[in-house]
Amino acid sequence: MEYITLNNGIKMPMAGIGVFMMTPDEAEASVESALKSGVRLIDTANGYMNERGTGRGIKKSGVPREEIFLVTKLWPTVYEKESAVDETLERLGTDYIDLLFLHQPTSNWRAGYKNIEKAVKEGKVKAIGLSNFPDDMLKEAIDTMEIKPQTVQVEAHPYYPQTELKKILSENNMGLMAWYPLGHGDRSLMEEPIFTDLAAKYKKSNAQIILRWHIQSGNIIIPGSKNPAHIKDNFDIFDFALTDDEMAKIAGINKNVRYYTATPQLIEAYASMELKTDL
Ligand SMILES: NC(=O)c1ccc[n+]([C@@H]2O[C@H](COP(=O)([O-])OP(=O)(O)OC[C@H]3O[C@@H](n4cnc5c(N)ncnc54)[C@H](OP(=O)(O)O)[C@@H]3O)[C@@H](O)[C@H]2O)c1
């Protein structure tokens, strides 16, 4: 495993798993399997509606809580709710969260940020992140909030490497957690000839080459998988390194295109979208 040190001094593993679009039982199984294979970073969210399942997976794995880096996200409808962090802790079955994000740039996010800052001061949260925030809102948070955010979580992969955002992050010593690190499993990305060639050279899979590219780009990765063999393979990426020339060739397939673009209407709708989070 490789680690990144956040701007508050906290050390974070650079590879973990995400449990987006999993039922509570699937999240439980995926988390248990990942932790048993040595994974120590788990990413969930209020909005994934599987925090209880995630918490059960942690308990069933037998891995001590202090060895796990647990990440979750507040959904916009609870940004202003004073008990939002405590309710999240209760669902996850833990008394602290390693990294807590605001999930979407909407609603009263400034109040939500202050809610998380308060939880940091109370020892319930160790680090703060912003997910899907556009550059101007991110800069506002960096410039005006008492505690500077430690990370962002955004879509990032070789077709959309977030080159502009990374300049802001590097100036502020912030990390980037890449969602859709494998392009949500898109075959046109996964089967790019450059990955097939490098997979043959290093005796790895195309997915492992893409994930290795992320690590060497400084990205924290949380690939999603329901397949225990994939989960294991996705962490078997720390015994080889791509050359500078290979990294440059991969940079050449950048299309500057996202898979997912949230419209302003959708982001607005998130502000009042009540989700059944108690699962
Ligand atoms: N903050 C946000 O708004 C946001 C949005 C989206 C996602 N996320 C986070 O990002 C995480 C990852 O996103 P994602 O799961 O949607 O996309 P992803 O990790 O890019 O891709 C997942 C897909 O890749 C396949 N896959 C995984 N490992 C593989 C391997 N070794 N070989 C071949 N195929 C493989 C999976 O299928 P199998 O199940 O068959 O392995 C699945 O279909 C989420 O779980 C979530 O934590 C955050």
Image (cartoon, grey):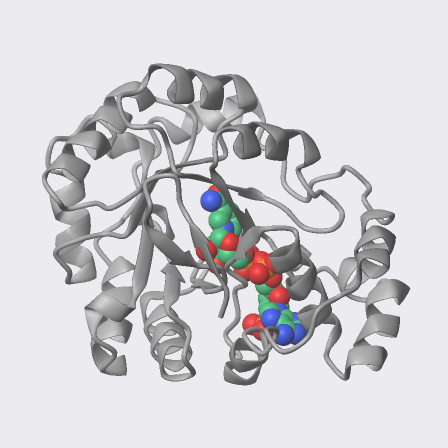
Residue 157 vs residue 113: left or right? right
Residue 272 vs residue 159: left or right? left
> On the image, which quarter does residue 144 sit in?
top left
Q: Quadrant of the C terminus?
A: bottom left
**Residue 208 horizontal/vertical position (percent):** 67, 72
Residue 111 against residue 205 in the figure, above or below? above
Residue 111 against residue 56 in the figure, above or below? above
Residue 49 appears in the rendering: no
Residue 60 against residue 25 in the figure, above or below? below
Quick check: which quadrant has ligand 1?
A: bottom right
Work out whether residue 193 or residue 40 is closer to the camera in this orientation and state it.
40
**Residue 63 horizontal/vertical position (percent):** 25, 78
Residue 161 vs residue 66: left or right? right
Residue beneath the point at 35% across and 28% down: 148
**Residue 103 horizontal/vertical position (percent):** 39, 38
Work out whether residue 118 or residue 92 is closer to the camera in this orientation and state it.
118
> On the image, which quarter does residue 166 sit in?
top right
Residue beneath the point at 21% across and 69% down: 65
Residue 207 vs residue 8: left or right? right
Total numbered labels placed on residues in the image: 0
Residue beneath the point at 70% across and 69% down: 241
Residue 11 appears in the rendering: yes
**Residue 209 horizontal/vertical position (percent):** 72, 68
Work out whether residue 273 or residue 184 is closer to the camera in this orientation and state it.
184
Residue beneath the point at 72% across and 59% down: 186
